[in-house]
Image (spheres, coloured by chain):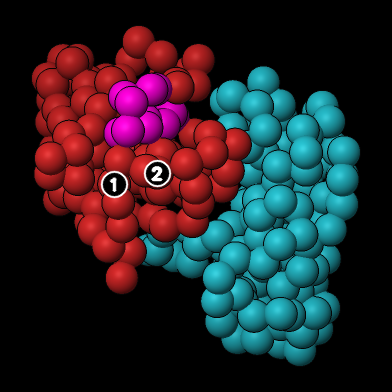
Amino acid sequence: EIVLTQSPGTLSLFPGERATLSCRASQTINNNYLAWYQQKPGQAPRLLIYGASSRATGIPDRFSGSGSGTDFTLTISRLEPEDFAVYYCQQYGRTPKTFGQGTKVEVK
Amino acid sequence: EVQLVQSRAEVRKPGESLKISCQASGYTFANYWVGWVRQVPGIGLEWMGVFYPGDSNTHYSPSFQGQVTISADKSTSTAYLQWYSLKDSDTAMYYCARLRSAYYFDAFDVWGQGTMVTVSS
């Protein structure tokens, strides 16, 4: 199975700062089938990005995804108070469609 | 509005059986894959498997193959996750979620609110 490694484990930033989250795959992800999800405490995950760089419906443009092959990045250009959460990447190009272990973005 | 509403929290003893549900609304149930994701409290997300109601095609993660059964009833637009013999290690939050399209290789775009399953003697 494809193992996804996210870094850093925790990112401590001030509101208004830029967040850069990394997701590295153990094998090439077919067709860049890589998604990013946001999860807040007590809530279900929410789809942010699919196809490595396409924003899901209703997602603000401060969220952007990039990358290909085995290295992918989620960037939040300016952190808003509601963006502090845990972020997961997921590859859906091969079964099982594995998730990374998550990156927590916390208020500094 | 597209929505997935899951059944309530459950408490069971080891060895007991359980079936939890996920009621879909706001879209044509038969035309989208629906799947299940496990989250152990404080831990990350695990993809369990998906089911296509249109033709009953099912894919499981090897980690969950033989441990659970994923099914659906088109007539009620409801997906199910079933255990025949629960273990302590099945204690977790379980989310149902819909793939963005009828294409198997797609992301989950709509999620249920989660069902907490607690297994304890």
Q: Colour of chain B?
A: red
Span of residues in magenta:
B48-58
Q: Looking at the rendered structure, which numbered label has been put on residue B32? A: 2
Where is residue B99 shown, x and y percent of the image?
Answer: 47, 46
Judging by colour alone, the chain drawn in cyan in this rendered image is A
- Looking at this view, is A33 or B10 the one in front? A33
- Image quadrant occupied by the N terminus of chain A: top right
Name of the residue lying farthest toward the top? B66
Name above or below for residue B49 compared with residue A39. above
Which amino acid type is shown beneath numbered disc 1?
Phe
Measuring 64% from the left and 80% from the top, which residue is drawn there? A60
Q: Looking at the rendered structure, which numbered label has been put on residue B29? A: 1
Taking the image as shown, residue A44 lies to the left or right of residue A84, namely: left
* Marks 2, 1 in one chain: yes
Decide: few, some or many residues near mark 1? Use Cα within 10 Å; few <14, some 14-19, many ≥20.
many
- Looking at this view, is A15 or B71 the one in front? B71
Taking the image as shown, residue A46 lies to the left or right of residue B26, namely: right
